[in-house]
Image (cartoon, coloured by chain):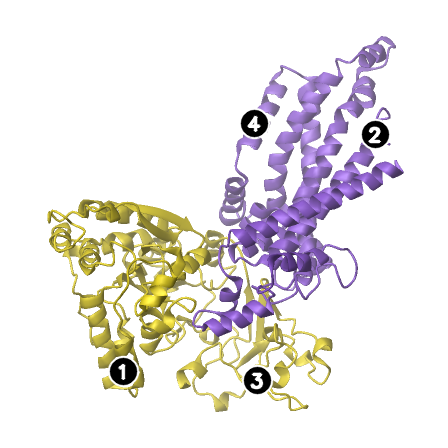
């Protein structure tokens, strides 16, 4: 619970004079975000003009937040640095403008017209430029973002209802190639297992049951695994059943996912798997991957990051039955019952479940035992269940302008710590 | 003329209803994602999704959902893009407010670009027609061919990279924080922030208009009344500008009305590349996030603008060309 309250999306709501249940949020069911009362070092500009004594429909929003357009944060006079030894609160004012072309935004950072880009993707050529130019090297910041990139299997869709096929794909997977298409080594570390190391206290830091030379995949090992599958009818290491052809694969249509799909097709072809790739808008892709009725076999575009520093943020939504459709985000359908599978139109009547292990870990107190439990789940998933192929532990890559005098990374949020981005003249 | 206007107004309503119904069908029958699921976030329960669906009215029968949207078409206080239905799934604010904030940006972009493309396209077209076959004509047509062939997103990126990033001659993309409403849009224009977007839009349209004016003027100059004017001893300048151009520019007026109307509905690519917070950028964001009320609001606004522009142009045609009479 304490982790959840520490998240940026958790914020206290002050009571109102009428004693309403939702306090000052009463009457703002759909748009409380524009009437937020800040409790931290910053508030939306103009928040001091909000008057909660008038009826909700007569209240005016803080002008500092205009959805889809801008966020302007100024110092919150109600916050005292003496009560907060965690946040530096250097800048006096933070202006966030929403929108723009990704490449153009990073050109603005390079030109000093922007200090920082939130949630952008630094173009690969910019990464190379900043890493190789001695004058710019201190302007690029690379930190583990505690997120993974992966390709997930639908365990109810042949041929991926056979664990040997899933293991064969894991052996064949060219993780290095996937990483290269994303921008090279700086974008992250090749993933040998599912949960990011910080959630397991680095217990599995060197663990990779499908390690291959240079992370480029091992076709021979893949064939040896495929030969054990029922879909390889002649045992030659090549999937030859009809289910091996035109496997419905969903991916993101933005770069680099189309190129990654092409590579996926390339290294799966020698083991007899051919793909029918559908490139979708990102939100649509996630919806389709999550929708058990979509009958996709592979979801090739997702990523997953922790919400807070505990393995339950991976275990429950990704692998337990609590994350099944219509909830989110168990794309593999682990833990689905026979009735659920039948209701979704699958011929497969059972899939593996790790609900017991997830529940066991969730009950443990924070500490070594809990870390160990999540690590055991990770190993079970990688070696026995194989619901996905994790290929990258993602890095957060930021470039900052010359104006920024101090940079700090908020590991909890997986973003730069805005309150610590100091510029000349800051008064804190 | 009165009966004609009434007929056109009724036809306009029919067109808008067809457009809205098709838009509604696309979003209902080809679901790109459940807006209720998007609204409640990543880790959720079926009950929360169902509550969100009820809050957005998505649990109602399709014809009731469409009827609720239809009421928002009526240009009347309380009905026009009403907050009950036209409430963005993405930004959680009324679509009407979002649109009114963005219209000035799109209007300044569209009108400014139109002025430039007229100032560029018409003279080039006239010169090309008068000096047919000459070096000037060939240069003008090369200008036109490049313009109609070049993708606008490529031109926009090229201009931004060259004139802002490398040469630092013009301001960067986007509108600064605090520039809101008409005052903000005009201030941004005065600071030169619209120059590159205007040029991107204007070049492609100027090229098209140059070709159109050239073709129309060449055709007009072969008419009998032009021969009559010359034989009456009028100067060539007078023949071209007083007699020839009037006939040649009439179709230009028609196209101009439609083109500006289309742009006022949202110059999607230009606004996206230049980070201009106009109607076009809103439409792109809304489509990407399956924000159906916003998409519907933008579609209806765009349809209204284009239909009205169409009507104005048709009426103007009657004044420009005395041979045209409406009943």
Residue A73 lies left or right of residue B98; in this view the side is left
Chain letter of the residue carrying label 4: B
Write down the quadrant of residue A389 in the picture: bottom left
Q: Is residue A89 left or right of residue A165?
A: right
Task: Say which element carries label 3.
Answer: loop
Of label 4 and label 2, which has the lower sequence position?
Answer: 4
Placement of B79 over or under B46, stated as above or below: above
Neighbours of disc 3 within 10 Å: few (<14), some (14-19), many (20+): some
Q: Distance between the residues labelled 3 and 2?
A: 64 Å
Disc 4 with disc 2 on a shared chain = yes
Q: Quadrant of the C terminus of chain B?
A: top right
What is the letter of the yellow chain? A
Disc 1 is attached to a residue of which chain?
A
Chain of the residue where label 3 is placed in the rendered structure: A
Residue bearing the label numbered 2: B320
Between A310 and A92, which is closer to the camera in this rendering? A310
């Amino acid at each position: 619970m304490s982790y959840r309250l520490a998240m940026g999306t958790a914020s206290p709501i002050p009571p109102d004079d009428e004693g309403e249940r939702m306090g000052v949020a009463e009457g703002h069911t759909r748009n409380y975000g524009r009437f937020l009362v800040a409790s931290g070092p910053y508030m939306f500009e103009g928040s001091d003009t909000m008057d909660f004594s008038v009826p909700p429909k007569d209240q005016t929003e803080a002008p500092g937040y205009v959805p889809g357009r801008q966020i302007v944060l100024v110092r919150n006079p109600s916050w005292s640095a003496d009560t907060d030894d965690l946040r530096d609160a250097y800048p006096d004012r933070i202006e966030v403008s929403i929108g723009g072309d990704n490449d153009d935004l990073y050109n603005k950072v390079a030109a000093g017209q922007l200090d920082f880009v939130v949630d952008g993707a630094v173009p690969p050529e910019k990464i190379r430029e900043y890493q190789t130019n001695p004058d710019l090297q201190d302007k690029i910041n690379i930190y583990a973002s505690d997120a993974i990139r992966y390709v997930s299997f639908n365990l109810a869709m042949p041929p991926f209802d056979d664990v040997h096929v899933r293991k064969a794909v894991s052996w064949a997977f060219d993780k290095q190639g996937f990483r290269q298409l994303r921008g090279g080594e700086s974008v992250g570390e090749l993933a040998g297992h599912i949960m990011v190391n910080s959630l397991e206290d680095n217990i599995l830091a060197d663990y990779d049951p499908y390690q291959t030379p240079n992370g480029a995949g091992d076709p021979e090992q893949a064939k040896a695994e495929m030969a054990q599958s029922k879909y390889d009818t002649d045992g030659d290491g090549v999937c030859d059943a009809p289910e091996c052809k035109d496997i419905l694969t969903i991916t993101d249509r933005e770069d680099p996912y189309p190129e990654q799909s092409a590579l996926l097709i390339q290294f799966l072809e020698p083991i007899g798997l051919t793909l029918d790739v559908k490139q979708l808008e990102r939100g649509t892709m996630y919806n389709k991957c999550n929708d058990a009725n979509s009958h996709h076999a592979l979801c090739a575009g997702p990523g997953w990051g922790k919400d807070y520093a505990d393995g339950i943020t991976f275990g429950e939504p990704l692998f337990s039955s609590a994350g099944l459709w219509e909830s989110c985000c168990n794309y593999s359908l682990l833990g689905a019952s026979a009735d659920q599978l039948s209701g979704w139109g699958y011929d497969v009547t059972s899939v593996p479940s790790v609900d017991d292990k997830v529940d066991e870990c969730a009950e443990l107190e924070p500490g070594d035992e809990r870390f160990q439990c999540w690590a055991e789940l990770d190993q079970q998933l990688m070696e026995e269940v194989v619901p996905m192929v994790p290929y990258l532990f993602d890095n957060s890559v930021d470039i900052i302008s010359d104006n920024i005098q101090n940079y700090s990374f908020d590991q909890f949020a997986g973003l730069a710590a805005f309150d610590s981005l100091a510029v000349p003249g800051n008064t804190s | 003329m009165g009966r004609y206007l009434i007929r056109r107004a009724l036809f306009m309503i029919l067109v808008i209803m067809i457009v809205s119904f098709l838009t509604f069908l696309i979003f209902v029958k080809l679901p790109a994602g459940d807006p209720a699921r998007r609204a409640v976030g990543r880790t959720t329960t079926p009950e929360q999704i169902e509550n969100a669906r009820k809050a957005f009215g998505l649990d109602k029968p399709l014809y009731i959902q469409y009827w609720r949207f239809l009421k928002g078409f009526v240009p009347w206080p309380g009905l026009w893009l009403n907050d009950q239905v036209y409430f963005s799934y993405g930004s959680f604010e009324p679509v009407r407010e979002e649109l009114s904030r963005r219209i000035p940006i799109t209007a300044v972009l569209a009108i400014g670009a139109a002025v430039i493309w007229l100032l560029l396209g018409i003279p080039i077209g006239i010169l090309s027609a008068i000096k047919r076959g000459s070096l000037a004509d060939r240069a003008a047509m090369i200008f036109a061919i490049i313009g109609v062939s070049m993708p606008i997103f490529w031109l926009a990126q090229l201009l931004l990279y060259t004139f802002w990033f490398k040469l630092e001659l013009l301001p960067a993309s986007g509108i600064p924080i605090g520039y809101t409403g008409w005052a903000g849009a005009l201030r941004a224009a005065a600071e030169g922030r619209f120059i590159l977007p205007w040029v991107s839009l204007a070049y492609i349209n100027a090229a098209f208009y140059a070709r159109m004016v050239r073709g129309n003027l060449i055709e007009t100059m072969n008419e009998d009344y032009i021969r009559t004017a010359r034989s009456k001893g009028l100067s060539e300048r007078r023949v071209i500008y007083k007699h020839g151009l009037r006939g040649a520019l009439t179709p230009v007026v028609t196209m101009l009305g439609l083109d500006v109307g289309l742009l006022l509905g949202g110059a999607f690519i230009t606004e996206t590349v230049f980070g201009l917070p106009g109607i076009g950028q809103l439409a792109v964001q809304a489509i990407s996030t399956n924000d159906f009320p916003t998409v519907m609001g933008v579609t209806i606004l765009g349809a209204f603008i284009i239909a009205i522009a169409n009507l104005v142009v048709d009426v103007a045609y009657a004044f420009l060309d005395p041979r045209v009479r409406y009943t």
